[in-house]
Amino acid sequence: MSHKEKKRGGRIWGPGMVITIVLLLLSIEFIGLLFFTKLVPNHLLIAGGLILLTVVLLICLLTNDLRKKLRFFLGAILAILLIIGLVVGNLYVISTYNTLVRISDVNTKTSAIGVYVLTDDPAQSIEDARNYTFGKLSNLDLENTANAVDQIQNEVGQGISTADKEGLTELVDALRSGECGALILNHAYVPVIEEMEGYENIESEIREISLQLVEESLDTKAGEDAAQVVQNEDVLQLFISGIDTRGSELIANSRSDVNIVATINTKTHQVLLVSTPRDYFVPLSISDGARDKLTHAGIYGVDCSMDTLGMLYGYDINNYFRVNFVGFVDIIDALGGITVNSDYDFTVGDFSYVKGANNLSGIEALAFARERHAFAEGDRQRGKNQMAVIEGVIQKMLTPEMLKNYTSIMDAVEGSFDTNVPYSKIAELVRHQLEDNSKWTIIRYSVDGEGASEVPYSMSSRAYVMIPDETTVNKAKSLMDRVINNEIITQSDAQ
């Protein structure tokens, strides 16, 4: 081999070629990940691939000759920046994909069935209570209770004695009187009991010695009673639920304190948020026409909440997005706070809010969204505030600051949120937004009603409920119809 050929060979297999190969491999991995995850439209993927190839070729030309030091130095700097960008990009894509897969397509619900004794009872475990008489409900949550009984009997290795009680108060009274040594009760019923006169301190009177988890598939039935199924492929209807649990884990069967139906039209870029007060007195999908507070539908699973709202508004709602209160705080803090518009000046504990724009942290936004006693409209205004917070989160997520806090946002999302919307649909929505980067219009509406005292399906005594104002329900239906039919509406239409 001639000296000239050796020099040419040295240049070909020198640092420049090593840099080029590394960049090509990272670029192929990055484009391959984007293709696999389907988060980017194909035309943008192709354009991005061509741009990456052009930059890699430019770096190759700049670094192919060590003797041209300035050119090599510029190429090396460009290569380092591109390598950093590709590594970070790969990590972002992998993190996004893994998080979305874990929180999406959740089509099961878990009922947490507790075994409770009096606080001063000597039993510390289910084994200690094996010979007790276990009180259980005879008219509510029968399937979950039966499954829990089977699990308890398997755990203690023998049959257990049970006593059926009709109603929550009768069940608690049997424990208080000593007729029963323990109760088998859905975890979600405990805060319901606290709503009843004479039982406000029940949580301090009883102690949980065992928790049985009963898992089943979601079973949405709203289509059987709903007037319409959405036919527009550009529309997604979504039940947004904020569940009444303070732990870090999601528990499916829990009261839903936030009950919002989101009608999302990706063609007109409109999001209609319709809030329904938690005390709305409506038939549940599982109650054979008996009315209950809407919040209690969550006790029987998120599918019951969706079905019940589907019956109310005449649409088959079978997609949900759910967050617990801890997740609510974490996601807003991860976003670096949000801006929320308040209709009033008011104070909640240590937090004060002004009419107009408020920059809020997660805990401040939570207090804002949960307060109702400061307003004449009570729960209806709380629903409006909850929608204002959701709007604040959406608007913040559409800003460049989303990228700055991306890793912490992904960490906050996982474990605090879940949805049964499949990953493929979420990826489609992401692709659509990347394709046209359009601004979204968010319209908010809250149905109304009149306060009354009734006996809800899930309770044994009278409680405050809100009798629906059918005029506002029909208005909500009309707004949904217009968004679904690709009409452009404004906030003034929702007044």
Image: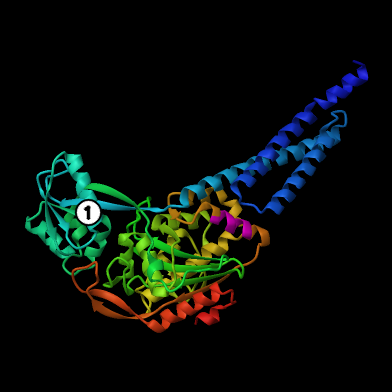
Q: Quadrant of residue 195?
A: bottom left
- Is 302 on the left-hand or right-hand side of 84? left
Label 1 sits on residue: 145
Residue type for callout 1: Thr
Residue 206, by quadrant, is: bottom left
The residue drawn where x is 22% and y is 64% is 194
Q: What percent of the width, then of the height, locates residue 267?
A: 61, 68
Q: Position of residue 411 (x, y in %)?
A: 49, 48
Q: Is residue 211 left or right of residue 118?
A: right
Q: Secondary structure at mark 1?
A: helix
Quadrant the N terminus occupies: top right
Does residue 430 show up magenta in the picture? yes
Magenta-colored segment: predominant secondary structure: helix
Residue 260, position as x, y percentages in the image:
43, 68
User: Is residue 59 shown above or below 316?
Assistant: above
Relative to 59, residue 291 above or below: below
Question: What residue range appears in magenta?
Answer: 425-432
